[in-house]
Image (cartoon, rainbow, N blue to C red):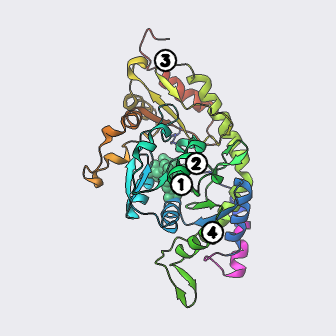
C-alpha cells in the first residue's frame, strides 16, 4: 500500500541536532524576547539572503502587518488577489484599501503594465507577491514606485534564498517579508522575517513587535507581540545549515516533473526566469481542459483517489472571499480569476522520491483526451 503523499512535508534537522542546539537554552533560562539564538539567526540570515538587515517575527503574516504599520501607509495599496489570504488580510487589517491589479498570465505575478492605471492620489504603496517563488518585475516596479513616490513591500513568503542578477531578492523594494512556516523551503516551525535597508525602519519594527516598547519607561507606539522565540530560532539555525542541500533535492524533483510535463498540450508550467536562481518552492501546473481533456478539479480528484493530495493554491482568489461581502469585483482581474480556477500545485518537498513523481505524472497523463499526444 502506497503512503499518502501530501502537497509538502516540513524540512527538519535530525532530532539530535535540534536537541544539541536547544541545550544551552536550559543553561541560560532565556526563552524569548530577542535572545542569543534570535540574534545569531538574524545575522546568519542577512548573510544567506544577501540583504542588509533582517528582523525576525513569530510568523510571516505579522511580519507583513508590522512592515505596513512601520511605514505609516494610508489610503490605497495596489496588490494582487492571486495569493494566500495573508497578503490581502494584512492590508485590510491595517485599515487600508487593497486595489487589485491583474497578474501576468505566464508567471502569475503582478502585471506591471497595469499598475500605473490604478495609481490615484490616495495610493501609498504597492504590495506585490513573488508567487510560487516566481519573481515580480522588480525593475519596473521600482521605476513606477519612484515616479509616484510609493513604498514597495514585497510579499516574498515563497522566495527564500532566491537571487536575481546575483542580488538577494529581499534587497529589492523598501522591505520584503519572508515566511518561515513549516510548509516553506526554510522553516522555523512558525516564523517570518522582514528584510530592509533603512535602519530606522528596523528600529521601528523592533519596537512594534514588542508592544511598541522603546525602553522601560517610554512606550510611544501601539505595538503588538510578534516576537520569535528561542526554540523557533534554534530550529532556524539548524535548518539553515541544511537548506542548500534541501534546495538541491527540490531541484531534482522539479526537473523530474518538467521531464514528464514539459510540452504537454494543455498543461502550462511556470517559466524558468532569466537571471534568477530559484528555490524550487512550488510546482504549479495550469490546465486547459479544452486542450488537455480533463480539468483541474478532475485531476485533483483523481490524484486524491490515489492518496495524492495536490492543492488548489491559490483558489479562491482573495477578492472573492465571503468575508469581503462583494466589495471587490473579480471580473476586474480576469487573468487571476482564470488562473485560480485552473491552477493545481503538485506535491513537492526535498524527500519526495522520483518514483513518486513518476507516479503523480503517470496519473495526470493518463487523463489526457484520447487522440492527444
Ligand atoms: N503570504 C503568502 C504568499 C503566503 O503563502 C503565506 C503563507 C503568508 C503570506 C503568511 O505566512 P505565515 O504567516 O504562514 O508565515 C499553508 C501555510 O500555513 C501558509 O504558511 C502558506 N502561506 C500557505 C500557502 O500554505 P495551508 O492552509 O495550505 O496549510 P495546511 O495546514 O493545509 O498544510 C499544507 C500541507 O503542508 C499539509 O498537507 C502537509 C504539510 N505540512 C503542514 C504542516 C502544518 C507539514 O508537512 N507540516 C506541518 O507542520 O497553508
The residues tagged by marks 1 and 4 sit, at their Cα atoms, a distance apart of 31 Å
The image position of residue 107, as x and y in percent, is 53, 35
| Dot label at residue 265 | 3
The image position of residue 183, as x and y in percent, is 55, 51
- Judging by the rendered image, the residue that carries numbered circle 2 is 142
At a point 50% along the width and 78% down the height, the residue shown is 211
- Judging by the rendered image, the residue that carries numbered circle 1 is 152
Sequence-earlier tag: 4 or 2: 2
Numbered disc 4: secondary structure:
helix
Sequence-earlier tag: 3 or 4: 4
Numbered disc 3: secondary structure:
loop
Q: Residues within 10 Å of mark 3 (few under 14, many from 20)?
A: some
Would you say residue 246 is visible in this rendering? yes
| Residue depth check, mark 2 versus mark 1: number of the one nearer the observer | 2
Evaluate if marks 2 and 1 touch, with contact meaning CB atoms under 8 Å apart: yes
| Dot label at residue 231 | 4
Amino acid at each position: 500500500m502506497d503512503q499518502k503523499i501530501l502537497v509538502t512535508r516540513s524540512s527538519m534537522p535530525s532530532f539530535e541536532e535540534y536537541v544539541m542546539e536547544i541545550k544551552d537554552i536550559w543553561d541560560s533560562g532565556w526563552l524569548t524576547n530577542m535572545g542569543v539564538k534570535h540574534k545569531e539567526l538574524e545575522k546568519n540570515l542577512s548573510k544567506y539572503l544577501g540583504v542588509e538587515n533582517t528582523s525576525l517575527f513569530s510568523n510571516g503574516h505579522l511580519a507583513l502587518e508590522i512592515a505596513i504599520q512601520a511605514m505609516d501607509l494610508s489610503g490605497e495599496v495596489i496588490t494582487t488577489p492571486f495569493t494566500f489570504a495573508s497578503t490581502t488580510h494584512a492590508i485590510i487589517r491595517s485599515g487600508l484599501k487593497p486595489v487589485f491589479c491583474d497578474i501576468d498570465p505566464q508567471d502569475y505575478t503582478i502585471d506591471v503594465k497595469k499598475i500605473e492605471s490604478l495609481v490615484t492620489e490616495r495610493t501609498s504603496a504597492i504590495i506585490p507577491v513573488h508567487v510560487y517563488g516566481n519573481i515580480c518585475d522588480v525593475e519596473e516596479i521600482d521605476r513606477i514606485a519612484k515616479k509616484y513616490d510609493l513604498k514597495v513591500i514585497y510579499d516574498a513568503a515563497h522566495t527564500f534564498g532566491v537571487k536575481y542578477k546575483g542580488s538577494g531578492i529581499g534587497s529589492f523594494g523598501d522591505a520584503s517579508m519572508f515566511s518561515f512556516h513549516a510548509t516553506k523551503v526554510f522553516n522555523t516551525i512558525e516564523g517570518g522575517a522582514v528584510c530592509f535597508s533603512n535602519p530606522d525602519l528596523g528600529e521601528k519594527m523592533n519596537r512594534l513587535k514588542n508592544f511598541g516598547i522603546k525602553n522601560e519607561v517610554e512606550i510611544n507606539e501601539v505595538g503588538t507581540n510578534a516576537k520569535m522565540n528561542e526554540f523557533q530560532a534554534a530550529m532556524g539555525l539548524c535548518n539553515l545549515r541544511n537548506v542548500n542541500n534541501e534546495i538541491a533535492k527540490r531541484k531534482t524533483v522539479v526537473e523530474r516533473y518538467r521531464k514528464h510535463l514539459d510540452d504537454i498540450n494543455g498543461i502550462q508550467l511556470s517559466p524558468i526566469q532569466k537571471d534568477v536562481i530559484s528555490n524550487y518552492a512550488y510546482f504549479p501546473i495550469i490546465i486547459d481542459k479544452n486542450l488537455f481533456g480533463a480539468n483541474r478539479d478532475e485531476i485533483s480528484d483523481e490524484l486524491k483517489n490515489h492518496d495524492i493530495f495536490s492543492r488548489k493554491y491559490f483558489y479562491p482568489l482573495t477578492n472573492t472571499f465571503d468575508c469581503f461581502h462583494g466589495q471587490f469585483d473579480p471580473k476586474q482581474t480576469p487573468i487571476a480569476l482564470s488562473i485560480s480556477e485552473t491552477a493545481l500545485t503538485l506535491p513537492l518537498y526535498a524527500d519526495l522520491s522520483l518514483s513518486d513523481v513518476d507516479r503523480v505524472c503517470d496519473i495526470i497523463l493518463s487523463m489526457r483526451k484520447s487522440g492527444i499526444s
